Structures are given as structure tokens and as C-alpha cells.
Image (cartoon, rainbow, N blue to C red):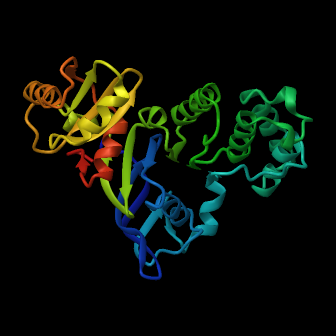
Amino acid sequence: MSAGGEAVIEARGLTRRFGSKRAVDGLDLRVERGEIFGCLGPNGSGKSTLMRMLLGLLAPSEGSARVLGHEIPRDAEALRPAVGYMTQRFSLYDDLDVRENLEFGAEIFGLSRARRRTRIAAALDRYGLAGYARTRAAALSGGWKQRLALAVATIHEPELLVLDEPTAGVDPQSRRAFWAQLFELAAQGTTVFVSTHYMDEAVRCHRLCFLRDGRRVALGAPAALLRPLAGRVLEVEGGRAEALLAPLAASPLVASTTQLGDAVHLLLARGAPGPEQAASEIQRFLAAGGLPDVRVRPGIPSLEDVFVAILLGESSEEAAA
């Protein structure tokens, strides 16, 4: 997204304490209109707490936030008609059918009877739910429940859509269809703030914010976050990949390893030599340990490598973020 666009979310020093624990710690953040903004981090990093504060569901201990021009949490009631929210778990009514869930959502958001009919018809068509209109929500698969939850969350055409790990446990095809809908919404001006653990989803976001222990440790476009890891990824092949994991983990040049089929994908430690020299040194190291028939070559970094680097204590900020 271009710098200087209209801010939908602005947070300054946002902090939330639970006893002595800082779930969110001094967070600064700016999200612009029409942006799909991803929030990532390990379990317990503060993602859900941050979302609840931005929605006015939880008061910050320190700092401030403005969402769609409203001071939060002071103006939370005025903000709610302009926001759609999906929680981690399906939170609609299992004993109601698809149409009844949509009708209930439209009524909760105060839509007039005429607009309610129009919006429900549009939602059934847009999300492919027309054939399930009289199906109880409990009978839907995970992917169709997800579509219904998104349809209800957007029934009132919110300016901001907040999604807390909305595709957890959903199959890849359903996740792809879900993200196609998010791009359509963003193209129409809806701002999307989403948390996810799926790196193939994270790479689709316009920008990402990584949290660790409640603090922002990386911010930027996916491509920008990958740049610092250029030259720090190697692929090792030869023999049984599982036999390579322990020897590679013992090398001082290696920060982390993961097996990908018949190969081992590794992230070099900070301060390691360039990829060609590191590859030669690792090959000699393995040969000295009785593994001479291996091939080590430069690899391509992924957002999973960024995630691992952050867990190891590194941070990365896009210069223009």
C-alpha cells in the first residue's frame, strides 16, 4: 500500500497487562483503507488481545487507538456498526439455518426490512450459499460454516473487517475461495485485519505485522520481510534426509532445520558467511561426520523462515513501514 493513505487503524503505545504479564506491549500500528493487513505470531504473542482492544472489547492499560476515526474504547459503541468480526471458532447459531443466521445478523446490525432482504439475497449469491439457505448451520462442513460466518460478518457492509484466524481447520480449497472473497472486499474499499498461522495466506497480505511477546518485531510487505534473509537459506540433499537433521543442527552455522521431502531446508545463523562459502563449510562438516555424499545449494527464503528467525530473537522492519 502507498504511504500516506487514509488511516483506518492508528495505535500508539498500545499496551494491555494481565497482572504482571504484558500481553500487548507498547504497540505502534497504522493500517490504511483497502489494505489486507496480516497479524502473525506464535500462540500467546498478543494477536487476539490486540484485536479485542481495537474493537473496543478490551480496554488498554496504556496507550491509545483510533479506529475509523473513533477513540477506542471510549467510542466503541459508535464504532460497532462499521465493523465486522469473525472469531477463531464458529460463533453463529447451529440450530438456525443459513438464512435465519443471516436474518439474525442483519437485524442485530439494525438493517431496515427492505435493505435486509436485499443484503441477504446478495450474500446468499455472493458466497454460494443459496443452495444451503434452509440447511441448519450445524450440518455445514467447516468450509461452508466459514462462508456463512463471513457472510454474516459483512451483511451490513462494514468498513473494517477483523478476522481472528478465520480459516483454522479449513481445507486448502475452501481457504483459497475465502481469500478470493477478501480480495474482492478490499478492492471495494473494505479494510481487512486478519490473523493467521498459514504462511501461504500471510504472503497474500499487503503488509504483515509479526508479534513476539506482545511486541512488534517485524512490519512490512511480505517481499520486504524476505529480503533480509536472502543468502541465508540452503537446501541439503543426499541419502536419507532424516539422517541429516541432527548433524546439521550441531553445526554452529545453522540456526534451524526442517525436512521437506527428501531434502533439508536450513536457515543460516546470523553472522554466518555467504551462501556459497557456508555451503562448502557445511558440506565439509557433514563429510567429516561420515556423510560425504550430500549436495548443499542455495535455497529460497519463505515467510516460514521469517517466522522462525523472529522466534529466534531476530527482528525486521521495512524502512518505509
| Image quadrant containing the N terminus | top left
Left/right placement of residue 169 relative to residue 190 reads right
Q: Is residue 4 visible?
A: no
Q: Which residue is rendered at x = 82% and y = 50% of the image?
A: 112
Question: In the image, residue 44 lies at what x, y percent?
Answer: 47, 61
* Residue 139 sits in quarter: top right
Where 102 falls versus 50 (above or below)?
Answer: above
Where 81 falls versus 289 (above or below)?
Answer: below
Q: Which residue is rendered at x = 9% and y = 31% of the image?
A: 274
Question: In the image, residue 224 lies at what x, y percent?
Answer: 26, 36
Q: Is residue 79 visible?
A: yes
Residue reaching furthest to the front: 290
Residue reaching furthest to the bottom: 19
Left/right placement of residue 240 relative to residue 180 reads left
Q: Which residue is rendered at x = 26% and y = 55% of the image?
A: 313
Q: Which residue is rendered at x = 31% and y = 41% of the image?
A: 306
Left/right placement of residue 32 relative to residue 103 reads left
Q: From the viewer's side, name the closer residue of 165 and 59.
A: 165
Q: From the viewer's side, name the closer residue of 159 and 200.
A: 200
